[in-house]
Amino acid sequence: LNFYFVNVFVGGAAGLSSAIEALRMGANVTLLEKSARIGGNSAKASSGISAAYTSIQKQHQVSDSVKNFLEDTTRTGLGFGDKQMVSTLVNESAGTIDFILNELKLPVTELLQLGGHSARRTHRLATHAPIGFSLVKALETRIADMIVNGQSGSYQLISSATVTRLQLQSESELNIDEKNSHTIPNSPTVEVT
């Protein structure tokens, strides 16, 4: 690595996943969450996670393809979606399910066909527990396990953070909050939503 610190803004599934990848590379991570509790909108998700051409679909003999997922997503979005982002979403969706199954150990083995889909591709927990809350908890647990087992750099969570500006405090620090004068390392920053 050419850097030792990574700042991640927003602690939903995308932020926690970004933190895991940075930690895996040995970075020291500061995650900033605007709420008192981590999870954001991800923690509220209840339907499931849509993905195409997954190992679970193959086990259930569901005929689906990345091409069909792309067509369904484009059609239901009335063509307004960013083509590159939609392409990335559908092309990497099976890998997301593999990560959830294998690394997070969440059994997203139930398949549903939701509105706008041409196949059963929404993956839910076999227990029917809310997927969002379970996913956030599993991501938090994975980060904790990485730290305890020495598989990563360090991790700091700043909750109830208000990022009002990024102002260079010194060569090595950024001021992020006028009220509380929080500082974070002046290093690469990932902002996810």
Image: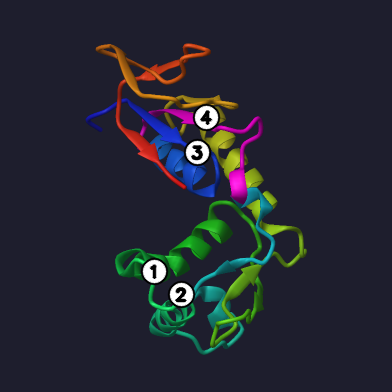
Q: Quadrant of residue 140?
A: top right
- Mark 2 Cα-neighbour bin, 10 Å: few <14, some 14–19, many ≥20: few
- 23 relative to 49 in the view: left or right: left
Sequence-wise, the earlier of marks 4 and 2 is 2
The residue closer to the viewer here, 96 or 68, is 68
Inspect the magenta stretch and tell me whether residue 152 lies in it.
no
Q: Amino acid at mark 1?
A: Gly
Residue drawn at x 47%, y 82% as measured from the top left: 72
Residue 147 badge: 4
Q: Quadrant of the N terminus?
A: top left
Instruction: Identify residue for label 2.
Output: 77
Asked whether disc 4 touches disc 2, contact meaning CB atoms under 8 Å apart, the reply is no
Q: Amino acid at mark 2?
A: Gly
Q: Nearer the viewer, mark 1 or mark 3?
A: 1
Instruction: Identify residue for label 3.
Output: 10
Q: Nearer the viewer, mark 3 or mark 4?
A: 3
Inspect the magenta stretch and tell me whether residue 38 lies in it.
yes
Q: Quadrant of residue 159?
A: top right
Q: Amino acid at mark 4?
A: Ile
Sequence-wise, the earlier of marks 3 and 2 is 3
- Residue 82 spot, x, y in % from top left: 34, 66
Q: Nearer the viewer, mark 3 or mark 2?
A: 2
Instruction: Identify residue for label 1.
Output: 81
Above or below 183: residue 128: below
- 122 relative to 63 in the view: left or right: right
- Residue 43 spot, x, y in % from top left: 65, 49
The residue closer to the viewer here, 22 or 151, is 22
